[in-house]
Amino acid sequence: MSSNLQPSVCGSESQVIQHVVSGRTQVLGVFGHPVEHSVSPCMHNAAAAALGLDWVYVPFPVRPEALCRALKALPALGIRGVNLTIPHKLAAVDAMDCLAPSAAALGAVNTVRVTDGLLEGHNTDPAGFMAPLVAAGFPAAGASAVVLGAGGAARSVAWALASAGASVIVANRTVGRAASLAADINAAVAMPVVSSMGVSDESALCAAVAGASLLVNTTPAGMHPNVTGLPPAPLSALHAGLLVYDLVYRPRRTRLLAAAEAAGCAVLDGLPMLAHQGAESFRIWTDVAPPVGVMLSAAESFLQAAG
Ligand SMILES: NC(=O)c1ccc[n+]([C@@H]2O[C@H](COP(=O)([O-])OP(=O)(O)OC[C@H]3O[C@@H](n4cnc5c(N)ncnc54)[C@H](OP(=O)(O)O)[C@@H]3O)[C@@H](O)[C@H]2O)c1
């Protein structure tokens, strides 16, 4: 790579990061399709700059049919690792030489590390989800959690909570999908602690939330641009002993979180999880403690600039 001044605009004008790319620069990136709206380049380049590391993180628009070839090319290109985003997380599993426990349990890879020419698959979403809960002092062991949604994010959340000793009810619009998720996670943890239900059974969902200490929204309801959306949460069952954790991060204060605060609940939004899952990837690649606060601020500025 020739020496070149590479300005990377991250959020506002005041956060332009300039990095001199040379033949010694270590390259990271993200494979996605589409990838142009990814927050990750901003977070990782800000982290590398804050630590004075000669690393650069590049978005690669990789089509689904090219994923396998792109992954196999990583060692030859000397690329140290990549994140995988939509639509690659499941398809990448078979291309890995080995899987970390999180990626094996979830059947999904969001972080690839290249080590001695081999591809290691990791999934940092569960750690990213748990870190803000731990920071908030939430005792996951023995907790009762209700998880709304049964997609990829719900799998990470249910596995993380079940592994930490919580019991979990997965409530979804398509009940069969919730049942499959529960069966898969129960098969991957020591004790079967995940059950499932449909969100259309309103009285059962109310009772579940009334008896829970944690409610997690993993549906996209309320996410930009449909910010008036509400996930299928029974608002009448919200109570002061409940922590409501919305994985949506754009906007940070969703309608669900506003209703939860009005009901006296503690709340967590999705941006710290976004920063922590990225931070965990950064640590896996660099073996350096990531500057999570820098990554969170960079993501926040990027999203504010995006409107
Ligand atoms: N904060 C973070 O770091 C982070 C990380 C990952 C994901 N997320 C967020 O989590 C959300 C879900 O991501 P995902 O990858 O899990 O998506 P996904 O695989 O498409 O799953 C979405 C789930 O939400 C349900 N759903 C969708 N729209 C709904 C609605 N209007 N009402 C009720 N249920 C609805 C779907 O139900 P059906 O099964 O019935 O279709 C499905 O179970 C997104 O907003 C994403 O941005 C945040």
Image: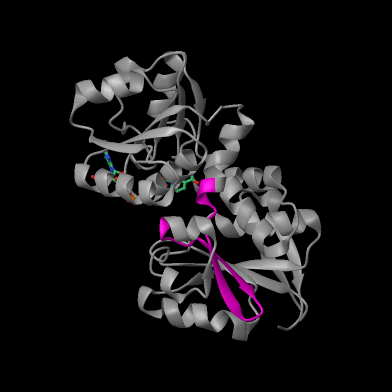
Using the image as rendered, state which of residue 137 and residue 4 is in the foreground: 137
Q: Tell me if 127 is positioned left or right of 191 in this view.
A: right
Residue 37 seen in render: no
Q: Residue at x 20, y 24 (%)?
A: 202
Residue extending farthest to the front is 190
**Residue 204, position as x, y percentages in the image:** 23, 24
Q: Which quadrant of the figure has residue 286?
A: bottom right
Question: Residue 16: x, y in percent?
Answer: 69, 56
Q: Which of 249/226 is in front?
A: 249
Quadrant containing the N terminus is bottom right
What range is drawn magenta here?
A: 106-126
Residue 256, quarter of picture: top left
User: How is colour applied across the structure in the image?
Assistant: one colour
Does 36 sit above or below residue 125?
below
Q: Is residue 221 left or right of residue 60?
A: left
Where residue 226 appears, x then y in whole percent? Answer: 33, 39
Q: Nearer the viewer, residue 4 or 266?
A: 266
Q: Is 86 situated above or below 243?
A: below
Image position of 59 (left or right of 167): right
